[in-house]
Image (spheres, grey):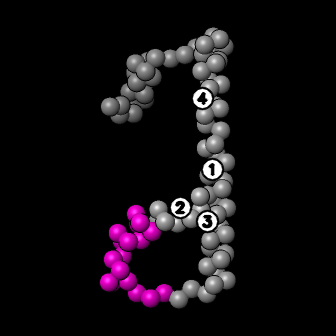
Amino acid sequence: MFIAFICFLEENFIRKQCPRDSMETVIVPKAKLQVVLSDVERLVSHFEDLVEDQDQIAEQRLEDIKSEKVKGRSEEELNKYLKARGVKVA
């Protein structure tokens, strides 16, 4: 996962922002690079923890609506609610 994330960053941001022929050489001590990589790994791990429960949360919400524990809203009702609060709805 971490390697894929680094490749994604390189492909989508680094190469587009700084073409290879115009890049300056930057020397980063290995110890500092390891600290940065460790921090990035930790942040990616925290992000994964945040989003991994989303399917379970959505399933629980659907069960609550079906069992009438909470009132489900239609998309039209939600759009009307958002528009009333100044949110632009497509």
The residue located at (63%, 59%) in the rendering is 43
Under mark 1, the amino acid is Glu
Q: Tag 4's secondary structure?
A: helix
Q: Which residue is mark 2?
A: 4
Q: CA distance from mark 2 to mark 4?
A: 27 Å
Q: Is residue 19 left or right of residue 28?
A: left
Label 1: how many Cα within 10 Å (few below 14, some 14–19, many 20+): few
**Magenta run includes residue 84:** no
Q: Which residue is mark 4?
A: 58
Under mark 4, the amino acid is Ala
Q: Specify the label residue 40 is tagged with.
A: 3
Residue span colored magenta: 10-26
Q: Nearer the viewer, mark 3 or mark 2?
A: 2
Q: Is residue 34 above or below residue 25?
A: above
- Residue 76: image quadrant is top left
Q: CA distance from mark 1 to mark 4?
A: 17 Å
Spot occupied by residue 12 in the image (x, y as percentages of width and height): 40, 63
Q: Nearer the viewer, mark 2 or mark 4?
A: 2
Q: Is residue 43 above or below residue 61?
A: below
- Residue 17: image quadrant is bottom left
**Magenta run includes residue 13:** yes
Label 3: how many Cα within 10 Å (few below 14, some 14–19, many 20+): some
Label 4: how many Cα within 10 Å (few below 14, some 14–19, many 20+): few
The residue located at (60%, 34%) in the rendering is 55
Q: Which residue is mark 1?
A: 48
Q: CA distance from mark 2 to mark 1?
A: 14 Å
Spot occupied by residue 90 in the image (x, y as percentages of width and height): 32, 31
